Image (cartoon, rainbow, N blue to C red):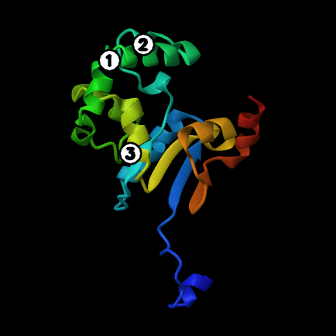
Amino acid sequence: WERQADPGATSAPLSCPKIWYASRTHSQLKQVVAELKKTSYRPWSVVLGSREHFCVHTSVSRYTGARQNAMCKRARDENRCPFYKGFRMGGQGKVNTSMLDIEEITQACKDKMVCPYFKCREDAKDADLLLIPYDYLINPGTRESLGVSLQNSILVFDEGHNIEKSCDH
């Protein structure tokens, strides 16, 4: 407030805060996206999820967890993922992830041969509204790996009474 009140202040201008909307499940986030579409509010938004939710590579998508991460890295390193190649070659501009749920993002990216996992990570850097599972905010390791900074952010926890259950896992 002091910076806003003092026109002579030399600090950087304040930016709009990011809104982090966290829910327990992706199906709940899908409902949020559907309801958001019914409004006139049109923020630049993106849903974040794991490779398990976003991977469209035929062989890599069959795995889960650390095995899937390793297979993804290997496919990228060996230039065997056409979706990652499409993402790197500028294909990310072909797909608009805003106001889409995970299934819609995955299909749109698959149609344009762009990796939905990396596309959403890239879009998250500039998004105004990020829709994510609780764990992405609660778990410091996950938060750090995603580069999530809570500075200048608004956190919304849908059904906050479920947060304790998420912390038990």
- Secondary structure under tag 1 reads loop
Q: Amino acid at mark 1?
A: Cys
Q: Position of residue 83 (x, y in %)?
A: 30, 23
Against 118, residue 41 (above or below) is below
Relative to 76, residue 37 above or below:
below
Going from N to C along the chain, the mark reached first, 3 or 1, is 1
Q: Does residue 135 appear anywhere in the picture? A: yes
**Distance from the alpha carbon under mark 1 to that under mark 2:** 9 Å
- State left or right for residue 29 relative to residue 77: right
Q: What number of labels is visible?
A: 3
Q: Is residue 130 above or below residue 102?
A: below
Residue on which the image places disc 1: 81
SS of the residue under disc 3: helix
Disc on the earlier residue, 1 or 2:
2
Q: Quadrant of the N terminus?
A: bottom right
Looking at marks 3 and 2 on the same chain, the residue that comes earlier in the sequence is marked by: 2
Res. 29 mark: none
Residue plotted at (24% across, 26% down): 113
- What kind of residue is marked 2? Val
Q: Position of residue 9 (x, y in %)?
A: 54, 86
- Other residues around mark 2 within 10 Å, as few (<14) / some (14–19) / many (≥20): many
* Disc sitting over residue 123 in the figure: 3
Please give the name of the residue rendered at 48% of the width and 38% of the height, measured from the top-left corner. 48
Residue wearing tag 2: 60
Tag 1–tag 2 contact (CB < 8 Å): yes
Secondary structure beneath disc 2?
helix
What's the amino acid at mark 3? Asp
Q: Quadrant of residue 58?
A: top left
Q: Is residue 115 left or right of residue 15?
A: left
Crowd band around label 1 with a 10 angstrom C-alpha radius: few (<14), some (14–19), many (20+):
many
What percent of the width, then of the height, locates residue 54? 42, 27
Q: Are the residues tagged 3 and 2 within 8 Å (C-beta)?
A: no
